[in-house]
Amino acid sequence: MNAIDDLTPVPERDLPPERFAELASRLLRDIEREQRRSSRGRRRARVAAMVLIPAAVLAAAGAYALNGTRTAPQVADEVTCYQAADVNAPAAGVPSQSGTSLAAMCRTAWTSGSIHWPVPGAAPASWVACTGHAGGVDVFPGTDVNLCRRLGLQPLPPGYRDAAASFRSLASAVSTRFADGTCVVEGPAARAARRILDAHGYGDWAIHAKGFSSAAPCALADLDPVNGVLTLNGWIRPKLERAAEAALDADACGPQAALLARVQDSVDAAGFPQWRVTVDHELSPNWPCVAGFNPDPGSLKIVLAGHASRP
């Protein structure tokens, strides 16, 4: 089964400029709401992590609404599955997959409870795919061939199946090269990134680098198919990252002083006593745990972040 055969076909059409402006305004409001709602910390982000994640408003949302139609390669990275035919409905995002239909991916997201918990009944049999309002592809339950137009979205671009397979191959190669436990410094990382892009047919992509320093010498790679850019971001050494993660995996909850001491001890034992462990908010009885951490190489701090309740 290919990636799109079991979707309701949607006719192509042009989106009026005034509709783009309306979407831009709405999406920028969504971004502001998401920023107010959550200051979650994060562990290290991974290219092509094959797990379902809560859908969030992406930074490129406003740009999409203004820039109009996108090509298949520009939307080949992510799929967002919605509970209802509404861009404000509960949703879950997952990286695109080769050899798996969009409908099958969304049925899995539905039945696993990733879209909504508890699972709201049997998964829909039919789905409609549109170019995503915030990047990637948005997939909604239903059979309405006019749904994309009604939601102010473009239809799925021609050639999406092949573009998604190509992008997944690229993402896999990038993830393998910049894998956990390795530290590829800026110069070799840029050369490796160029070889990978050229080998997978993305020779016209640009490579940007930022955030490298003696405290953050290791490359993380982020793929931006909309703008055709692979960005290399400076990151902390794997040994330091593992030390902070191991302490939080063992117990990410307070009392606050004890939590800070546990993580600091792990960081010190790994050979990084110059790094200090802090927390970005006071722990409370309702939120006694953190969800992850953000390193601050400039100040040599591991900042525990994200309001979380006990498991």
Image (tube, rainbow, N blue to C red):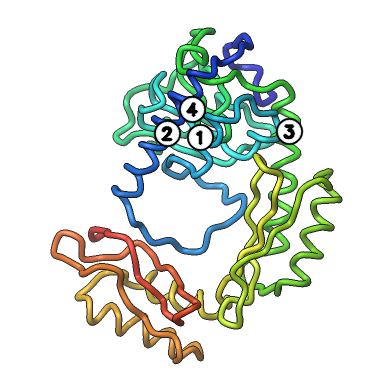
Q: Which residue is mark 4?
A: 107
Position of 310 compared to 128: left or right? left
Position of 165 compared to 68: left or right? right
Against 120, residue 13 (above or below) is: above
Asked if disc 2 and disc 1 are in contact, CB closer than 8 Å, the reply is: yes
Q: Which image quarter holds the C terminus?
A: bottom left
Q: Which residue is mark 1?
A: 134
Choose the circle earlier in sequence order: 2 or 1.
2
Choose the circle earlier in sequence order: 3 or 4.
4
Choose the circle earlier in sequence order: 2 or 3.
2
Label 3, label 1: how many angstroms apart (C-alpha)?
18 Å
Mark 3 or 4: the one toward you:
3
Amino acid type of the residue that numbered disc 2 sits on in the rendered structure = Leu
Choose the circle earlier in sequence order: 4 or 2.
2
Q: Which residue: 73% across, 62% down?
A: 177
Q: Which residue is mark 2?
A: 27
